[in-house]
C-alpha cells in the first residue's frame, strides 16, 4: 500500500516537471517478489494506471503553476491551500482505492484486530479527505498521537486496550463504527458526508469535528455499541 502512496506520487512529480528536465529516465528497482503488483517508471505506470498518475501529476502541476505565478507577481495570492489540499487528497484516495483491492488478500497475514483497523482506516481516509484536512507537520503530529503506536494483536479488545490511551481507544471505536455504518448503508453515509463537505464552510466544520473527535465526551456513547 505504501508503495502507491510514495513511489507513485514521486513519479507523478517527475512527470509534472517538479525536478526540471532530467537527462535520464528514472526507473525504480523491482522487488524480488510480487513484481507484477507494481510499476517502475513513469511510462510503465502511465500505461497501467493512467488515472492515478494523472491525479498525482495534477497536484504537482498545480503547485508548480502557483509557484511560477508567485515569482512573476511577487505574490502568493495565486496559491489556495484549500485547492491544493483538494488535489492532494483526491490523489491520495485514488492511490488507496487502486491498491486496496490488490492487497486485500494480504490482510489474512495480520491479526484480526490489525486487519480490521487497516480496513477501518482506509475507509476513514475518504471521510477525512472530503474535509481537505490539513497535513502540515504540526497538525499531522498532533492527530497521529491518537492512532495506535503499535500493531494490534489478538487479544486487543476495544474499547479497553490497556496500553492505549482513552483517546486512542475512542478513536479506534469510532473508526470501527464509521466503517460498519458506511458498509451497512452501501456507502450512503460517505456520500452524505461528501455532500456536506462540498463548500469551504462545510469543510471547515468537518475539520473541526475531526480534530475534536478524541476529546469529545459524546464519544462515550460509542462504548455502548457492540463491536
Image (cartoon, rainbow, N blue to C red):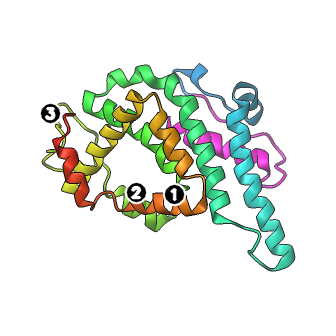
Q: Residues within 10 Å of mark 3 (few under 14, many from 20)?
A: few
**Vertical side of 201 occupied by 34: above or below:** above
The residue beneath circle 1 is 133
Residue range (magenta): 1-30
Left or right: residue 32 versus residue 57 is left
Helix, strand or loop status at disc 1: loop
Between residues 157 and 30, which one lies in front from this camera angle?
157
Left or right: residue 211 versus residue 158 is right
The quadrant where residue 142 appears: bottom left
The residue at the point 78 percent across, 44 percent down is 15
Residue 182 at x, y percent in the picture: 41, 34
Whole-angstrom CA distance, mark 2 to mark 1, is: 9 Å
Q: Earlier in the sequence, mark 3 or mark 1?
A: 1
Numbered disc in front, either 3 or 1 = 1
**Vertical side of 19 occupied by 122: above or below:** above
The residue beneath circle 3 is 155
Residues marked 2 and 1 touching at CB (< 8 Å): yes
Q: Earlier in the sequence, mark 2 or mark 1?
A: 1
The residue beneath circle 2 is 210
Residue 205 at x, y percent in the picture: 47, 62
The residue at the point 76 percent across, 26 percent down is 47
Amino acid at each position: 500500500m505504501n508503495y502507491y502512496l510514495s513511489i507513485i506520487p514521486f513519479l507523478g512529480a517527475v512527470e509534472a516537471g517538479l525536478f526540471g528536465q532530467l537527462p535520464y529516465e528514472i526507473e525504480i528497482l523491482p522487488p524480488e517478489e510480487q513484481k507484477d503488483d507494481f510499476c517502475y517508471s513513469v511510462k510503465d505506470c502511465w500505461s497501467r494506471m493512467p488515472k492515478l498518475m494523472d491525479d498525482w501529476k495534477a497536484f504537482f502541476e498545480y503547485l508548480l503553476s502557483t509557484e511560477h505565478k508567485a515569482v512573476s507577481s511577487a505574490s502568493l495570492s495565486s496559491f489556495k491551500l484549500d485547492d491544493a489540499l483538494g488535489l492532494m487528497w483526491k490523489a491520495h484516495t485514488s492511490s488507496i482505492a487502486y491498491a486496496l483491492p490488490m492487497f486485500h488478500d494480504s490482510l489474512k497475514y495480520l491479526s484480526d484486530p490489525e486487519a480490521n483497523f487497516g480496513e477501518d482506516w482506509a475507509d476513514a481516509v475518504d471521510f477525512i479527505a472530503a474535509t481537505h484536512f490539513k497535513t502540515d507537520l504540526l497538525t499531522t503530529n498532533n492527530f497521529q498521537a491518537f492512532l495506535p503506536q503499535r500493531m494490534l494483536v489478538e487479544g486487543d479488545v476495544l474499547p479497553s486496550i490497556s496500553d492505549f490511551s482513552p483517546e486512542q481507544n475512542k478513536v479506534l471505536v469510532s473508526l470501527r463504527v464509521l466503517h460498519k455504518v458506511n458498509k451497512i448503508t452501501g456507502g450512503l453515509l460517505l456520500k452524505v458526508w461528501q455532500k456536506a463537505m462540498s463548500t469551504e464552510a462545510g469543510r471547515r466544520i468537518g475539520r473541526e469535528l475531526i480534530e475534536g473527535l478524541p476529546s469529545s465526551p459524546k464519544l462515550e456513547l460509542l462504548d455502548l455499541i457492540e463491536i
